[in-house]
Image: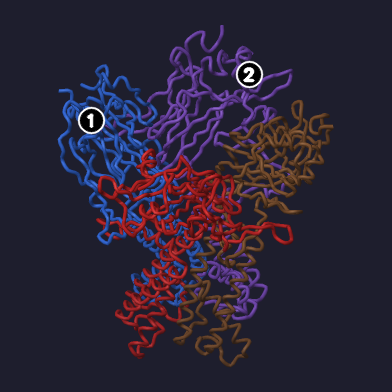
Chain colours: A purple, B blue, C red, D brown
Amino acid sequence: MAGSNHRNRFRNIDNTGFGPNSSVEGGRLINPDGSTNLRKRGLPIWERISIYHTLLRMDRGPFFFWIFLFYTSINVVFASIYFFIGVNNLSGIDPAQTAFQQFTAAFFFSSQTLTTVGYGHVAPSGMMTNIVASTESLLGILAFAVVTGLIYGRFSRPRAYLRFSGNLLVSPFKSSTALMFRTATYKNNHLTDVEAQMTVALHVTENGKIVTRFYQLPLEISKINSLALSWTIVHPINEESPLYNFTEEDIKNSKMEVIVTIKAFDDHFSNVVMQRTSYTYNQVVFGGRFLPMFERAQSGQYTLLELDKINTHERVVLPQRVFSEN
Amino acid sequence: MAGSNHRNRFRNIDNTGFGPNSSVEGGRLINPDGSTNLRKRGLPIWERISIYHTLLRMDRGPFFFWIFLFYTSINVVFASIYFFIGVNNLSGIDPAQTAFQQFTAAFFFSSQTLTTVGYGHVAPSGMMTNIVASTESLLGILAFAVVTGLIYGRFSRPRAYLRFSGNLLVSPFKSSTALMFRTATYKNNHLTDVEAQMTVALHVTENGKIVTRFYQLPLEISKINSLALSWTIVHPINEESPLYNFTEEDIKNSKMEVIVTIKAFDDHFSNVVMQRTSYTYNQVVFGGRFLPMFERAQSGQYTLLELDKINTHERVVLPQRVFSEN
Amino acid sequence: MAGSNHRNRFRNIDNTGFGPNSSVEGGRLINPDGSTNLRKRGLPIWERISIYHTLLRMDRGPFFFWIFLFYTSINVVFASIYFFIGVNNLSGIDPAQTAFQQFTAAFFFSSQTLTTVGYGHVAPSGMMTNIVASTESLLGILAFAVVTGLIYGRFSRPRAYLRFSGNLLVSPFKSSTALMFRTATYKNNHLTDVEAQMTVALHVTENGKIVTRFYQLPLEISKINSLALSWTIVHPINEESPLYNFTEEDIKNSKMEVIVTIKAFDDHFSNVVMQRTSYTYNQVVFGGRFLPMFERAQSGQYTLLELDKINTHERVVLPQRVFSEN
Amino acid sequence: MAGSNHRNRFRNIDNTGFGPNSSVEGGRLINPDGSTNLRKRGLPIWERISIYHTLLRMDRGPFFFWIFLFYTSINVVFASIYFFIGVNNLSGIDPAQTAFQQFTAAFFFSSQTLTTVGYGHVAPSGMMTNIVASTESLLGILAFAVVTGLIYGRFSRPRAYLRFSGNLLVSPFKSSTALMFRTATYKNNHLTDVEAQMTVALHVTENGKIVTRFYQLPLEISKINSLALSWTIVHPINEESPLYNFTEEDIKNSKMEVIVTIKAFDDHFSNVVMQRTSYTYNQVVFGGRFLPMFERAQSGQYTLLELDKINTHERVVLPQRVFSEN
């Protein structure tokens, strides 16, 4: 590999939390959504998974579907219990009805108890149904408490709401080139004390074995006070870069993956927020330059940020003899 | 511009999150309430807006109005459903009533179901109304969970509760002048480890093009241990200041905007709080001095902070040959 | 004042958030519970007071009393409304009853609506009562949301749960003396990264005017990794101390107040917690030494911390010619 | 003790929050679950215990058992009140029933009131029962608020979800040995900015008295950017180590305890999390090496972390003349 001699000058960082043999063929270390491409084993699933956080991160549709399913299941269970005790222990249900009618009546009574709406046109009259109904209404209150907690948790979970450019560009920069990506917040939030970090993972052959090496990529500006518009994060490919003298071929051969972390203080949440993503070698554009994504509004009264242009770039020719050694 | 030679000595900071061409004529970068004078485009509004945070930051009046409107709308929707199913499927409503009477009865039944009050003098008797009522009571519980979350979120959102002086004063300071503003907390909260930051934005002509340049303004004291009374933040206009030798005219021509950020630890919330504001050139008073805003109580037992005096200042004559070059 | 020559060597710190003329005769700057002895004026009370935080910090008894009072008042208001509309619009109330009986019946109907218990033996039958009841049940749900938020807020408010010794001791220390106080957590919580800060306020006569001067008191150990047992915070009174060569008389004349702040990370709350208190000159014991407050349990299996001994100290004679100049 | 001469070169750290005489025979300072082996006395238990946090940290089973017990007890109390007032003041209960039947009817009415389900087939008819029922439904709402807060608190309490290896290994390391333990997160969470700290407590005889001395153990790597897989924390036993030249015997005689603290930022909770544990001398394996606990998945698409292998190690022979002085 062309750049390997140069690269040897750099200290491989071993504090990334990944090991040298965690490389995967065709896979990646970090998924584009920031999660780790990792599975855990050796513990039962209910110990490995935080149900609360799974429900917190779930999309809105499935979340409410699960709640609806849960509500219906609980009612089916209690309806069955009332049915087997006998609906003659529920005043207001005609015991002369068919079994199906009795079951649906029990089902609706259950739902009225679980939600504590309790109309009372059907009410428990026997000892057993009273005990079951009393338990069910407590269960309803507890379930409601859980749902309240989940919904509040979903609302209030601090998130950075960042969009990233789809590509990682190799752009002309000063008299050389630089790796660049772009980010912007897409909600009406505002980040301050924003820090960026770029780590590169290279899968290289050492002593005939493929190992993964990690290097920190120094950034032109790694911290900004405030992120109102967009921010282009720039890693200059110069003598200080472990990628110096890499050819396009080298990048592909090493199955390069660039892991990106943004950490900031969000004044919506008054909390630190963090977002990660990663770019693999096939998301790299060799010779590209981002086009502006904000402009003065026609009225001149405000600035307009165009979020759909976050990845908009033009093709440019890279300066010769800088990225490759030919 | 008089000060531009001097100003060139200072490094233009490019990590403010604003670009050099974000300047607006007649507009401002930061609104007095601390929000960014910025609009976003290119994503549908529901992706661009965080409804939760919008409801969190809304004034109390509109907030409860929206809740009331939402409650009424849901009831109208469900009343319509019950009405079209037929009120003969609701026991306790006289089907001989007029359509309007039937609709209002359905409306009130809906509200009794949604809030889970469920008196039961009206109750679902048919299959369809039972299904709808069962769904509505679940919806009521979910809506209630959302409202609980919103109300708790409104309460517990960490805020600095800072008032700022309405004007930015150019005051005599030592043998020269200084830019000064004043801040105080207006609630019964107490801030510790309070940090202030002042950034100036100057819209200047470079190569015939108007660009915005940002400079950090060094402060006499930028961090205090504790903010119990008021704090006057002071930027001395000396050789270290990018505003050195600026005339009143220069300040107006450059459409100067001073962005102010206060960050502190609040022991109400046990959380970091942040508040921003900005002053534009037309809020600057050339020659003013803040008058004290606290005094010993007559009883001598406590200190009295007068919040309505936060902007009270007297006019003073500035020392000659310091602010202007004439 | 004996020590004033020496004291002049120290920089008066002006970033305490208190001004030089905030001194009060007979009063203090910080109350023992850590709040500031300060009143605010110039804004209406509802803008000056954070009701949420007032209810959060209130003792349990008054808190539940206010909730009960609020509940009763709301019911009285709604009972009056139902009464004036006429109880004949509530099915289940006998209109032949006395006015008092009618009012109490309306009151109990109101409480059944507000809490959404809604038995239904009394139910709204007229248009007006239906509208009022529908509004009241919404109000009940909102009030409940507020109470849930308050109760959760009370629970989850990060607090340090620190006890402080009642006295500030002047103890023998090395070959000189030191100011000492003691602190310990009294709940089953555990603090890490604990930092202490001591600031002294001295009310001194300068140019015939009484002004307050603040000095940081250097501590022997100002940060500990973990606070499991008790911690005695020590300010050595040596050449580095602004109190060097002060006599007992000097301390009384200057109405010395020592403000103490402890900041730590609490792993109960996973949050930073902060607690303050202050000692005035009349809490100072000249010549005292804290006695141990923890011991090995008789079984030898654990350590026993005796919280009631936090202020237990013995009288000792101070070394001569150190604290006073005689 | 062999190593004591060497050890004297190290500064005993006195900011651990434990005292020199907190040593216990047969006991330990920190329990494996991270809590302090400490009891407090001198305050009534309700002041010493944070009920909220006790309920937060309780296992799920006991937590719901306590809620169920609390629910039943409240209902028994109120049932007794209704019973003594007389069930003839509750419409819908037949006063001709046996006392037991009356009591159970009162019990179920109480549960319907507390949960606000309020069917209404039983309803308060007298003044006293109305007052009690009105109070009970308020109490129900408050209790529900408490439970909602508790359940949300249990969900959202930031935790590190770390597993630790059961043993502390003395492993060959470079040309000497090192103390090593291993940790990994067992849920689908991801830690960043992870810091480890190792403190050793040695119970040594000084002047014929057993005292406890604390030393910080320097780590090879004490901070990693990200913890995705497992992390082996390494304290090299070289000239920089207070354990240098210790024999196996020394370690046992000093009843060595190693206290371990991991602090990190968790992006599930967007909060700092902390977890502690400790290893005593009888958990030390003299001569062991951890075996890998993660591997490439057979499909090559992801990495597989095997949590049940966290303590898997093989026995190795330690290099001579390094750990012992023989």
Please name the residue shown 59% across and 19% down the image.
A251
> Which type of secondary structure does the marked residue at label 2 adopt?
helix
> Tag 2, which chain?
A
**Residue A35, visible in the rendered structure:** yes
Q: Nearer the viewer, mark 2 or mark 1?
A: 1
Q: Quadrant of the N terminus of chain D?
A: top right
Nearer to the camera, B163 or B303: B303
Numbered mark located on residue A253 in the image = 2
**Residue B52, visible in the rendered structure:** no
Q: Residue B88 appears in which quarter of the rendering?
A: bottom left
Q: Which residue is mark 1?
A: B176
Please name the residue shown 66% across and 62% down the image.
D61
> Tag 1, which chain?
B
Q: Is residue A316 left or right of residue D151?
A: left
Please name the residue shown 70% across and 50% down the image.
D32
- Tell me the amino acid under the disc marked 1: Ser
